[in-house]
Image (cartoon, helix red, strand yellow):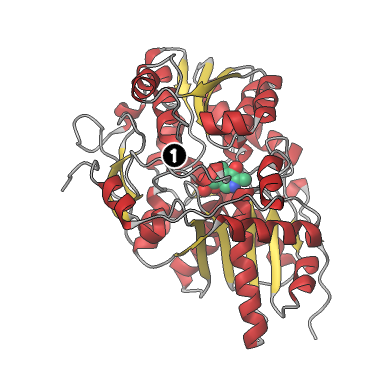
Amino acid sequence: MSKSIPNKVYLSEDELPRQYYNIMADMPNKPQPYLHPMTKKPAGPADLEPLFAKALIEQEMSAERYIDIPKEVRDIYAKFRPSPLVRAYGLEKALDTPAKIYYKYEGNNPSGSHKLNSAVPQAFYNKIEGIKRLSTETGAGQWGSALSIACALFGMECTVYMVRVSYDQKPYRKTLMQTYGANVVASPSNLTNAGRAILAKDPNSLGSLGIAISEAVEDAAMRDDTHYALGSVLNHVILHQSIIGLEAKKQFEKIDEYPDIIVGCNGGGSNFSGCAFPFMHETLTKGTKTEYVAVEPAACPKLTKGKFMYDYGDTAKMAPITMMYTLGHDFVPAGIHAGGLRYHGDSALLSQLYHDGFVKAAAVQQTDVFKAAVQFARSEIILPAPESSHAIAYVIQKALECKETGEAKTIFFNLSGHGNFDLAAYEEFLAGKLEDFEYTDEMLEQGLSTVPAIG
Ligand SMILES: *Cc1c(COP(=O)(O)O)cnc(C)c1O
């Protein structure tokens, strides 16, 4: 008999990790270099300096395995971390599965998601380099909220370009950001060339992350006192998010368990990678057999349907060109309710590891996602974010497979955030009005038709 395992595994503040983990050190094939969007030549640190703090650029390019977390950042982390590792006894019972299901809960801060883990160090490094203002985009609103909070803590200004469809669907997200002092602008806006160009073509554009990124990058590029901050995709963001997996490893150690399967939803790759990469260190260095699964919306299937190629990170072609899985930088996904998963591309690190076969991917439909979300809420209490519920839908599938085969696998997933601001989406689901969207071959062909030919 296995010994009894508590509902929650906590760490003390003293056990908060003091260093981030950088998977670049252990990858058999490093990601291809970023290319400058104009010259299409490899982008060096100097190309990134108009947009990012030097310390963050160093992290972006670093191959050091462990990187110190500054004391000032750890002190702020201690206000909302370490986050608990929870055994999903309620969900296991509801599914009548022999599988053991665990999740790390990252919704325990006012941004409602893991995004604050990177917003804090990003604001910190910009602050100490003399930057007064940060510009950014937000899709679902979680990243904008996180950066607003981080800027408030360090006494910085913050301007957030919020994708129009979310701006309209989630008005309280806007109020939350304003409460922390941010200036929130619906994107596309008439404040930037990128925004004006889109509005001239389509005054009713719902916007997209790609467009909002273009606006925020342009804003930062035009002002000396302003840098840009990105909430996902980049190596330094994924580095910061490794705090999730590093904590989880210690928590699993405490209960003498180890996951067989690690699952996360995938937008730009940060929560999945942050959770999975510290475990993948064991796979890459010792051959530990663990399955890693990134789950994406069927309406925005970059890993399962996209192509591994160089593409722009944004619609206006101002961000670096990245070797990644992409649906094309002009792709505007259907207005599904998982706003944080509507990005056309993916992290270079995650893309390379997926390409090399270390990561699996799965796509799930929106109605299955909300079915899973409601089942989770009713058995585990927490109302999950629609994004996180993609992971839950997959975990439920796996747990039901275990029921068929009688295998007691240990499944671990990242519950990246709560859905307390997503009640309009829940309302639609409960009223039976939520639709599934098919992503077609024509959409892929169309999307990839504008991708730059490189190499
Ligand atoms: C932003 C967000 C995501 C998607 O972004 P990743 O970088 O892929 O993690 C997922 N879940 C929540 C709750 C988010 O806020």
Please rate how many residues cluster around mark 1, counting C-alpha atoms within 10 Å: few if below 14, some from 14 to 19, many from 20: some
**Residue 321, image quadrant:** top left
Q: Position of residue 443 (x, y in %)?
A: 33, 50
Q: Position of residue 303 (x, y in %)?
A: 40, 57
For ligand 1, tell me if the residue under mark 1 lies within 8 Å.
no
Which residue: 72% across, 49% down?
83
Residues 325 and 245: in front is: 325
Q: Is residue 246 visible?
A: no
Q: Position of residue 58 (x, y in %)?
A: 41, 36
Of the four image quadrants, the one with ligand 1 is top right
**Residue 94, image quadrant:** bottom right
Q: Position of residue 211 (x, y in %)?
A: 41, 30
Left or right of 310, for residue 136: right
Task: Give the residue type at disc 1.
Answer: Gln
Q: According to the image, label 1 marks what residue?
A: 59
Looking at the image, residue 291 lies above or below residue 148 = below
Locate the N terminus by quadrant: bottom right
Looking at the image, residue 329 lies above or below residue 145 = below
Q: Is residue 350 visible?
A: yes
